[in-house]
Image: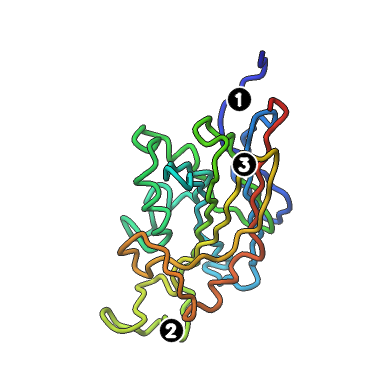
Amino acid sequence: MRTNIVVSVLVVVLVSSCGSAPEKVEVDRSMPNLSVTVTFNPDIYGTMMFKKLYPTYAVWVEDVKSGDVRTLYVTGKAGRDKWIMADERPSSVPVWYGARKREKPVETAGTVDAVTGATPSGQTFTHSIELPAVMMNKKLAVFVEGNVSFDYSEHYPKNAGKGEPGFSDVNGQPSVVWKAVLDTGQSGTEADLIIAGHGHVLGEDHRIYPDMSAITTAKDIFLHVGARYSPGEAR
């Protein structure tokens, strides 16, 4: 019989940081859980008001067979669609916005807020979730989508006008999506996420575009992204 009570299924653990951290919430490690670790690359981020522009990003998993979605974490502005001088920014994490529409819990008020946090800063963060029963003994696709605004490039120039090639509004290069597949039917497994493609530069759809030939520094906003499944002690 379990004697401990877990208040939330989300945890954001600070592994190594020189900046602020989202609120930490405990995950019951005796239960099956999945963790995604993101290592930032602040050397390539721009600045605004003397502060680094850390990425907007989302972390989620999808059942490969059924398409069932669970969000582990999303940065605050993207999760709540509240931006400075903008009601929405569909270009920020467009692939996750599509996944969110398929995620059943978002039909319940407050669910997105439960996994939304301040953008982390520093070096490395780990985001974890207790796996729901419907995702046990399944193959899960693990996704991280990240985007840094104003990272203009030769292919997405700042001076491109609306309707011209490379126009991105304030987005610069589009979001980049990392992906790996984990089998929760195994006792424990881990994998490095690799780039699967990018999102639409203006957020006009939720597809992953595999052609990365026009993407430059956006591919390097994270130094490493890894995922690990643990069956927990109760298994």
Disc 2 to disc 3, C-alpha distance: 37 Å
Mark 1, Cα crowd under 10 Å, few <14 / some 14-19 / many 20+, is few
| Rendered residue at 65%/71% (across/down) | 43
Secondary structure at numbered mark 1: loop
- Amino acid type, callout 3: Leu
* Looking at the image, residue 131 lies above or below residue 201: above
| Rendered residue at 72%/49% (across/down) | 15
| Rendered residue at 70%/32% (across/down) | 232
Q: Which mark is residue 155?
A: 2
| Rendered residue at 30%/82% (across/down) | 161
User: Residue 82's x, y, as percent?
Assistant: 38, 51
**Residue occupied by mark 1:** 6
Outermost residue toward the left?
A: 163
Q: Which mark is residue 59?
A: none
Q: Can you tell which of label 3 and label 1 is closer to the viewer? A: 3
Q: Which mark is residue 34?
A: 3
Depth order, front residue of 113/207: 207
Looking at the image, is mark 2 or mark 1 earlier in the sequence?
1
- Amino acid type, callout 2: His
Q: Quadrant of the C terminus?
A: top right
Mark 2, Cα crowd under 10 Å, few <14 / some 14-19 / many 20+, is some
Looking at the image, is mark 2 or mark 3 earlier in the sequence?
3
- Amino acid type, callout 1: Val
Q: Are marks 3 and 1 in contact (CB under 8 Å)?
A: no
Q: Are marks 2 and 3 in contact (CB under 8 Å)?
A: no
Looking at the image, is mark 3 or mark 1 earlier in the sequence?
1
